Amino acid sequence: VVTCVYDAGCAEWIRSMRRSGWSPRSNVFTVCVGMDKFVGEVGTDAMYMTGISPWDASLAMSDEVVGWTAGEFAGRFVNTTSRTPTYHSASGAASVGVLVQAIERAGTFDSGAVAGVLATGEFETLYGRLSFDRNGQSQAPSLYLQYDANMTVQTVFPPDASSGTLVYPMPTWDERDCLLESTCPSGSEYTRSGTCSADGTCLCSSRYVSNGVGADASCVLVPEEDMTYISSSLLVVGLIFFGLQSFLSVSCAGWTVYYSKRSVVRASQPIFLNFVSLGTFLISATILPLGIQGEYRDDSIGSVDAACMAAPWLFSLGFSIVFSALAAKILRITKVMHAAANFQRKKVEVKDVMGIMVVVVMVQVVILVCWQLIDPMTWQRELIAEDINGYPTQSVGSCQSDHALRYLVPLAVVDFLLLAVALILCFKSRKLSNQFQEGMYIAASVVSMLQILMLAVPILVIVENDTSAFYFVLAVVVFLISFTVQCLIFFPKIYRLHLGPGGTNVRRSGTSVVSGVSPAGRSNAYGTASASGADEIRKLSSMLSTASEAAPTRESDAERRNSNVTIRSNNSSNGGRDSPLETAHATDSGHQDVVRSSRSLVTGVIPSGDDATTQASERGPEETPRIDEEQPIVESGGVGK
């Protein structure tokens, strides 16, 4: 920028450039550079400004007459007049020196001779090397001047008269302030020295970064930020939890398949036991994404975001699979027992009760998909503490969603309703034989889970910002929920199969057999509980009488005879051998027999596989199948009566 103004306009122009933040590569003034008034008005803002002048005290020339340099002349002038000399004063002094040199060279005071010397000669003066053209005008070149970093005017052109080097482009206003007012060049107690850059920031050494701009620029030590990552030892603990539960789930699934033909396992319906193992495995797998962490958001944070949503997917699906499988399992048994109690033939297949699982899982999937698409959880890092320079010293990362409760609440409601249905079915099947009803263990699982959550929730609130503690509590909760359900559902069956009685076996006795009846005081296959064996006999006799009256009478009078009703049950005290508990003879007032026909046999048959059937049939003594000591009354999850 070339600024053609009088001396009054120079200061105003510089102030306008500073206010607007405009920093041209160079600013050339036609006047003002070298004037005391100019420097007094703009101060250090005059630094690196350039200008044109015929003379300056920085001129590297000596006067041939007096031997003074331009600087010496300026010093003497200041001492004499207390003012900084301008080119006007230097021009007057140089004029005297040129005239003296011309007279000496002419050797006379003749004006014509002196004029001839002036017209053809060159003269060394404190004003520079002077010569004149044929019109008598000075041919001395103009000087290109510039204020240096010390606010001293330097001649930067022409080269043979220069006293300094041109600074181009001149520094920006921010860089000027950084050089003059900040601690960047020198450092301080808390900073390190650096170099001011063109944008007014500091160029610092390793581990130091520029802080601030212009006058506030400095090189500060960047503190090591505590990212509050989960400790490695706790991550290992979480992996151990997952490994233990995975081993337990796979082992129980393998045990179920291996012993699928045994009565204990078949009575527990293997397909649903395998669903329970799958569900507990998925629940425990929630521990894996909980341990995935990240820094601040960048292009590589996508994997951490995926882990944020993987946790609710795994836990919700695993939970719904476990308890919907248990509910379907109990529902199937309940339907079979209800049909048997009413002496109805009814086939209850797996597909008849799988609907409850499909509905629950699909509802969970719909909610999770909506969450995933509309407002998924993402990894966010929040600042907890910073140093005096504003650099973070501690932060915590977590998975966050703007409206997470909109999806967590429906998921929780579905899970709660599922638990309620399971508990209701458990209550309805509470009087079944221990071999078939698992309500006690399912109820224990639910109670245990609620106890774990009651303890864990307030602890999680307290340790919310302690990442390691928060992860550990979550990992323990997930592990305990899956481990508790797995143990309560499987361990009683494993104990019964390997250490206890291996199911209820019966032997044919007489011509009429009623199996699945427990001793006095226990639940029997008809869903009744008696205070004594006699009570059981009376109830069973009444049921048999009702069935025989409803059935067509095809027997002859000769075939009608007294029937013995023998109730047998496994007795662990005698090594598992059948022992007659009680034999009862009853005679109806209108009939001689408790049972109208010795061929009337009420049975509940569950064929092999997963189909469950109850049927009421009439067989003669010769048609009654032999039930030996090793033949279970339950096959593939049903009950026989």
Image (spheres, helix red, strand yellow):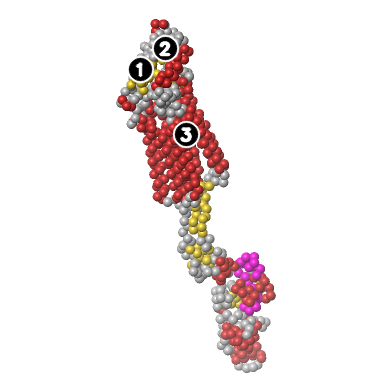
Judged by depth in the image, the label closer to the viewer, 2 or 3, is: 2
134 sits left or right of 432 in the view: right
Query: Which residue lies at the image location 44% right of the left edge and 36% below the top edge?
Result: 445
Residues at marks 3 and 1, CA–CA distance in whole angstroms: 38 Å
Calculate the distance from the C-alpha at mark 2 to the C-alpha at mark 3.
49 Å
Q: Residues within 10 Å of mark 2 (few under 14, many from 20)?
A: few
Percent from the top left, x then y, of residue 503?
A: 37, 26
In the rendering, which numbered label is found on residue 561?
A: none
Q: Quadrant of residue 271?
A: top left
Q: Is residue 419 above or below residue 183?
A: above
Which secondary structure lies at badge 1?
Answer: loop
Question: Residue visible at 35% across and 17% down?
Answer: 508
Quarter occupied by the N terminus:
bottom right
Q: Nearer the viewer, residue 423 or 98?
A: 423
Q: Name the residue: 58% across, 89% down.
A: 65
**Which secondary structure, mark 2?**
loop
* 25 magenta-colored: yes
Q: Residues within 10 Å of mark 3 (few under 14, many from 20)?
A: many
Q: Position of residue 134 (x, y in %)?
A: 66, 82
Q: Amino acid at mark 2?
A: Thr
Q: Which mark is residue 323?
A: 3
What residue does disc 1 label? 508
Q: Which residues are magenta?
A: 15-38
Which quadrant does the C terminus fall into? top left
Q: Is residue 488 above or below residue 65?
A: above
Which residue occupies 39% across, 9% down? 561
Of marks 3 and 1, the one in the foreground? 1
Q: Which residue is mark 2?
A: 587
Residue 603 x/y as whole percent: 42, 18
Q: From this view, report whether residue 258 is shown above or below residue 291.
A: above
